[in-house]
Image: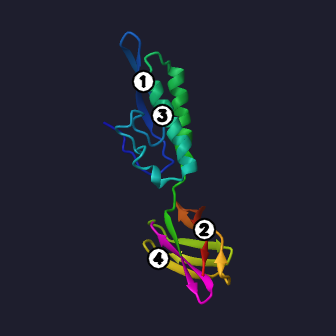
Amino acid sequence: MPDTIRREPPIMHPLQIRLRFPGNRSRRRGVQSGAIASCGGEDAGIKVGADSYQYTTASWAPFAAALASARGVLADDAAIQEAADTAARKLSEAQALLVKSIPVKLAAEQSCAGPNVKMKVSVVNDSDLRVTVVLKTLFGTKTFNDLDPGATRFNPFNAQSQNIAKGTVDAEVTATVDGKSVTQHQTLLYPSHSC
């Protein structure tokens, strides 16, 4: 009967991975491989491509690489148990280091307020968490505290200039994830504008 797999990392389950050796011999060995129920992916608690958006790019990349490596070992008829154990260990370590992303959408709209450029920056909380967002621009800083899931906020920044060059809006997003305060950073590019 398959283990019950929770989706939230880090989780450690003793799993059965089948290794096939030359001569059609096979054996099973229980290993610790986190939320991955099968390195073949059919029963995986986390699916490449389907769930990657839920985690930060920086933490997902090594996990995906470890998963690909583990699948390669399982597909290798010449693989030895030591290679399988090493692949499972690296997969478990990468899975434990996955960081859940906090999806917040940023947008900038430029217009003219009299002779000067005005830039309205909007924030949409696409996560299921309450977040705090700090916007930082060349024209000022704005903090949105306790932004509810699905909520939208915006702030107009007055450039006090008739022309602005292309630049960036930096956003610092903080939320409580699995009982811990997590801060992530996003950057929004905006074009030059003249009034």
Q: Position of residue 41 (x, y in %)?
A: 38, 37
- Extent of the magenta region: 110-126
Secondary element under disc 3, as helix, strand or loop, is helix
Q: Which residue is mark 1?
A: 75
Magenta region includes residue 118: yes
Q: Which residue is mark 3?
A: 68
Q: What kind of residue is marked 2?
A: Ala
Q: Which residue is mark 4?
A: 152
Q: Which residue is mark 2?
A: 171
Q: Residue at x 46, y 76 (%)?
A: 152
Alpha carbon distance from label 1 to label 3: 11 Å
Mark sitting earlier along the chain (1/3): 3
Mark sitting earlier along the chain (3/4): 3
Asked if the residues shown at circle 3 and circle 4 are in contact, with their CB atoms under 8 angstroms apart, the answer is: no
Secondary element under disc 4, as helix, strand or loop, is strand
Relative placement, left or right, of 127 versus 144 is: left
Vertical relation: 168 (above or below) 141 = above
Chief secondary structure of the magenta span? strand
Q: Residue at x 45, y 20 (%)?
A: 76
Alpha carbon distance from label 2 to label 1: 43 Å
Residue neighbourhood size for the residue with mark 1, other residues' Cα within 10 Å, grouped as few (<14), some (14–19), many (≥20): some
Residue neighbourhood size for the residue with mark 4, other residues' Cα within 10 Å, grouped as few (<14), some (14–19), many (≥20): some
